[in-house]
Image (tube, rainbow, N blue to C red):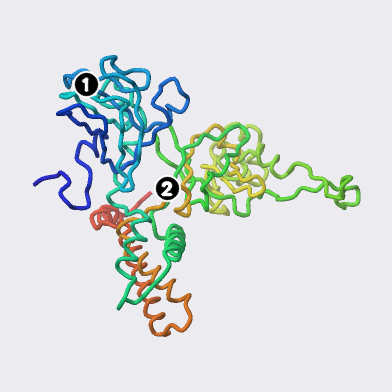
Amino acid sequence: MSTSPNGGLITETNQQYYAGAQGFTTTAPQQVFTFTFDTEFVLGSPDPSAVDYMQNNFKLYASADGITYTEVTAANWPVQYGVSGYTLDVQANGDSQITLAANLPANHILVAQLKILTGGQYGDRDAYGTTTEENYGNYSYVSLQDIVNNFIVGYVGQDKLIPRVNRTDVIFHAKRGLQEFSYDTLKSIKSQELTIPHNLSVVLPQDYVNYVRMSRIDELGVQHIIYPTNNLTDNPYNMPLQDGQGVPMQDNFGENTEGTSITEEKWNKANTNLINQDYNWDLFNNGMDWIGYNWGYGGMWYWNWGEQYGLVPQWSQYNGWFNVNEREGKIAFSSNLRNQLIILEYISDGLAYDLDSRVPKLAEDALYAYISYAILAGRINQPEYVVQRLKREKSAKLRNAKIRLSNIKLDEIVQVMRGKSKWIKR
């Protein structure tokens, strides 16, 4: 079976998709070449000495024999080919048209290599980047632009439910639907790998909406869940300085003078072992188990005896705690996580960057139903039974999308449940 583009939805060859490369062999002197990647070319500068050269997401290579390839740049072009350099023109259909400053002779090869982690297979193999990898798996998504175009074609027109609608209205409701879906339906969870600095706080990601999970990574690469502080501590939003009577003091402009948070200072210095009862011999030697944390015997034969009684479950763990400092726009961590490696998982609204503005094909139909309902529900003189039918249809398709995207596999459930019948004895 052929895997080359033949009129279906796949428009890239295997070489374009897997290797991030596409080449042409000239049969006559040729100056203009059109590359058909799904990824549009980005050209900062064809001159390697220019600062903008690093913005390029591809490299061009030319060869006379198909064995030795030379990068095509403004400063590296064989003299016999004439003037050096090239320009880029991105077509309306997304193709990238390269125009060389001079003709490439007949029986020569011109190859475009998207930047890739391995550096590619041409020239000095230094086309390092992630452009090729960013395109992997894109077939499972449909762009927001295609959603808008498909909706107008399939749902708007004479003898259809929506006779006419402005394209801007469709775009607005499509974006709103994508935002709403991103919060609890779509796989819009992002993650960052971070190291907790000495000040025990990291800045919220630029496209952060809410956190999903925080994990500490141990020496084996295994993650351990970090829990929110809840009622354990907090980050005060205002810290007014007070006089001897407890009244906030003002500056020369009549505004309250602000100090630093004593609560945060104490929390940053806190010994978390005194909270989660994760005792060690240092605490034992200091007599910490004599002041009500244990049964009070203090002897090694009774070490940790009785600790499991009277614990608060949400605090009885040693992975650490975190809380969102709304005042500074940061996430604060407990002192036992200093210099630890963590993974922050969070959700965005799906509209922060162009790469976000895409919808899983498993939820495409649900977004069409959302747009239909949103458009008609906002119009006057619409039959209520039509609006209610679209509302029920929207809810049903959204529920189906959630089930599809939950990615539940029967074999995985069976594997987990196999151990549920075991008796645990002590």
Q: Nearer the viewer, residue 291 or 410?
A: 410
Q: Residue at x 34, y 69 (%)?
A: 397
Q: Nearer the viewer, residue 52 or 17?
A: 52
Q: Residue at x 22, y 29 (%)?
A: 30
In this view, the mark in front (2 or 1): 1
Q: Residue 229, how many percent across, how many down?
A: 59, 50
Disc on res. 328: none
Q: Residue 55, how many percent across, how many down?
A: 43, 31
Q: Residue 192, how many percent across, how many down?
A: 46, 40
Q: Residue furthest right?
A: 244
Q: Where 263 sits versus 76, above or below?
A: below
Q: Residue furthest left?
A: 1
Tell me the kind of residue under disc 1.
Ser
Q: Nearer the viewer, residue 20 or 399?
A: 20
Q: Where 340 sits versus 377, above or below?
A: above
N-terminal of the two: label 2 or label 1?
1
Tell me the kind of residue under disc 2.
Asp
| Left or right position of 83 against 44 | left
Judged from the image, the secondary structure of the residue bearing numbered disc 1 is: strand
| Left or right position of 139 against 381 | left
Q: Residue at x 43, y 59 (%)?
A: 178
Q: Residue 384, how many percent across, how many down?
A: 43, 84
Q: Residue at x 42, y 76 (%)?
A: 376
Q: Which residue is mark 2?
A: 354
Q: Which residue is mark 1?
A: 63
Q: How many angstroms separate mark 2 from mark 1 (CA)? A: 35 Å
Judged from the image, the secondary structure of the residue bearing numbered disc 2 is: helix
Q: Nearer the viewer, residue 383 or 333?
A: 383
